[in-house]
Image: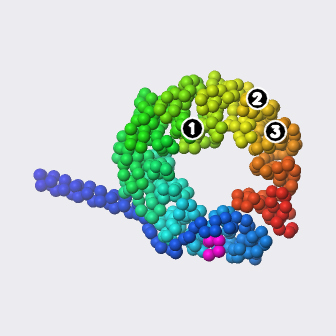
């Protein structure tokens, strides 16, 4: 009996050991990187901007690029080509494969890829045979194991990029597991360790907050994969420009995502501002940071999620942790209303050092000293633009605005709140009356009647409006300079041209309404 029991344990031990070895080999195999030399060294930033005015031309079913004198710069031998703009390399397509050429038309990447990105910070991301990879300036193709994916579309200036080595849902939603690793531009892992989650390396400090797989705690690593802040925190966000990072310990019966206790640590992991808030935001260039108490579940949402919160109290602190404003505000908006709360680009102050705040259900504007610039008397206020006007609205309730207008920095109404919607770009104001759109100037004078169904484009010097099935191009003098059946905006990003369709034919048109090709 004893011998049988002992033999059984030995067999079980061998099975467990074998399974462990198999799992280890599987993990190593799953995280493998393949490096292949595919081309010579790739030169970048040579004659930068030389192709910025080139445009596409089709001949015999193939496309190339010509200059402003209609001379061929890139012969027509491709099925598709991206404009250079200010870049020195651009992507081309032949049938269903992509490559990359330089300003001389030479192939610097062979036409063999399923997708090709832009050359940024010394690497271009590619997809080949259902695998993601990149080509560096040494001409090496580095491919990931099947199922691994880059997080982001480029290496940052540290020469590193995040890689999801499990499924993307686990990586983005921080599901427990070995999800994230960091890859160098040479094609080497920063560390053999995988993390539940990790942020990008900061370009100034070269540090990345990461969540340790074995403990579920957060710490910070450097570009060599060395822990510079031990993994003892419940959450750490990226470092601000002043070298401080938001950090959290669970408390008040809340986890960090729902509130917890937040403060700021330095690059050594020492508390500089003790954890006593339920939410904190990164420090901004003016040395101030938003803080909040009683704001539970605030992270990852936007402004419109907070109109009904009454228990929240918001304010600003300086880098010493001192309150610059009292904790009295119901909400502090992002200067860009499209940013998510707590994202690194979610700033409270605009370029004027003004911040939109909410007090007693009304919105106003304060400066960095906490003084009122615009008293809280509107239902919503948008940040001031370059023309020193801010969009405002009022309505029957704080959740619904039905009348829009504009104020100046003194809080004076300069365009009355009588429109169903409105926006502004420099001195051009687009307004909605009923279901139709038109334009007025900053003096409130009508320049374009409200007869258009849709606003397609609204730039400082040009607009494209739609009426029925027709598109109308309007210049900065509010004059109609073009009329067409369809348009393609891609070219405008590079040389100020639009690709428009009239009578079944596509041609280039500039912002003055002049066609570059004969009809």
Residues under labels 1 and 2: Cα distance?
26 Å
Q: On the image, numbered disc 2 is attached to which residue?
A: 412
Image check: 504 left or right of 54? right
- From the top left corner, tell me how far across and down residue 465 is, in percent: 81, 49
What secondary structure prevails in the magenta region? loop
Of the numbered discs 1 and 3, the one sitting upstream in the chain is 1
Q: Residue at x 45, y 29 (%)?
A: 276
Q: Nearer the viewer, residue 451 or 108?
A: 108
Image check: 229 left or right of 458? left
- From the top left corner, tell me how far across and down residue 86 is, in percent: 66, 62
Crowding around mark 2 (Cα neighbors within 10 Å: few <14, some 14 to 19, many 20+) is few
Of the numbered discs 1 and 2, the one sitting upstream in the chain is 1
Q: Is residue 354 above or below residue 162?
A: above
Q: On the image, numbered disc 1 is attached to which residue?
A: 286
Secondary structure state at the residue bearing disc 1: loop
Q: On the image, numbered disc 3 is attached to which residue?
A: 442
Which dot, 1 or 3, sits closer to the camera? 1
In magenta stretch: residue 399? no
Q: Residue at x 70, y 64 (%)?
A: 52
Residues under labels 2 and 3: Cα distance?
13 Å
Of the numbered discs 2 and 3, the one sitting upstream in the chain is 2
């Amino acid at each position: 009996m004893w011998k049988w029991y002992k033999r059984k344990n030995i067999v079980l031990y061998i099975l467990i050991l074998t399974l462990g070895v198999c799992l280890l080999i599987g993990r190593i195999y799953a995280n493998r990187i393949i490096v292949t030399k595919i081309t010579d060294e790739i030169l970048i930033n040579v004659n930068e901007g030389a192709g910025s005015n080139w445009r596409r031309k089709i001949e015999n079913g193939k496309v190339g690029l010509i200059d402003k004198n209609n001379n061929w710069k890139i012969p027509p031998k491709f099925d598709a080509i991206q404009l250079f703009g200010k870049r020195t390399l651009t992507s081309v397509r032949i049938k269903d494969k992509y490559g990359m050429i330089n300003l001389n038309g030479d192939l610097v990447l062979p036409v063999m890829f399923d997708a090709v990105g832009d050359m940024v910070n010394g690497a271009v991301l590619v997809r080949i045979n259902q695998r993601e990879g990149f080509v560096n300036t040494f001409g090496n193709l580095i491919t990931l194991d099947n199922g691994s994916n880059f997080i982001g579309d480029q290496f940052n200036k540290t020469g590193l990029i995040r890689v999801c080595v499990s499924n993307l849902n686990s990586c983005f939603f921080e599901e427990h597991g070995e999800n994230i690793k960091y890859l160098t531009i040479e094609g080497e892992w920063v560390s053999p360790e995988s993390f539940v989650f990790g942020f990008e390396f900061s370009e100034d400090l070269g540090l990345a907050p990461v969540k340790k797989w074995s403990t579920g705690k957060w710490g910070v690593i450097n570009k060599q994969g060395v822990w510079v802040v031990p993994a003892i925190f419940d959450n750490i966000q990226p470092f601000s420009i002043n070298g401080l990072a938001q950090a959290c310990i669970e408390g008040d019966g809340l986890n960090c995502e729902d509130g917890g206790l937040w403060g700021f640590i330095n690059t050594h992991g020492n508390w500089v501002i003790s954890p006593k808030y339920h939410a904190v935001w990164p420090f901004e260039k003016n040395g101030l940071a938003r803080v909040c108490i009683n704001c539970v579940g605030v992270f990852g949402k936007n402004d419109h999620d907070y109109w009904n919160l009454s228990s929240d109290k918001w304010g600003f602190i300086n880098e010493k942790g001192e309150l610059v404003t009292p904790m009295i505000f119901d909400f502090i908006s992002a200067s860009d209303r499209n940013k998510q709360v707590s994202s690194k680009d979610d700033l409270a102050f605009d370029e004027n050092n003004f911040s939109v705040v909410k007090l007693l259900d009304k919105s106003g504007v304060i400066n960095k000293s906490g003084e009122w610039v615009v008293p809280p008397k509107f239902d919503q206020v948008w940040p001031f633009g370059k023309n020193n006007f801010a969009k405002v609205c009022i309505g029957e309730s704080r959740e619904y605005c039905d009348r829009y207008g504009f104020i100046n920095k003194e809080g004076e109404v300069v365009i009355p709140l009588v429109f169903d919607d409105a926006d502004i770009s420099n001195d051009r104001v687009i307004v909605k009356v009923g279901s139709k759109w038109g334009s007025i100037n900053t003096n409130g004078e009508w320049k374009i009647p409200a007869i258009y169904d849709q606003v397609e484009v609204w730039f400082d010097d040009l607009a494209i409006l739609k009426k029925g099935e027709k598109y109308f191009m309007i210049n900065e003098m509010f004059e109609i300079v073009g009329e067409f059946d369809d348009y393609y905006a891609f070219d405008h990003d590079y040389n100020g041209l639009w690709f428009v369709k009239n009578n079944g034919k596509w041609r280039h048109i500039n912002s003055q309404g002049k066609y570059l090709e004969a009809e």
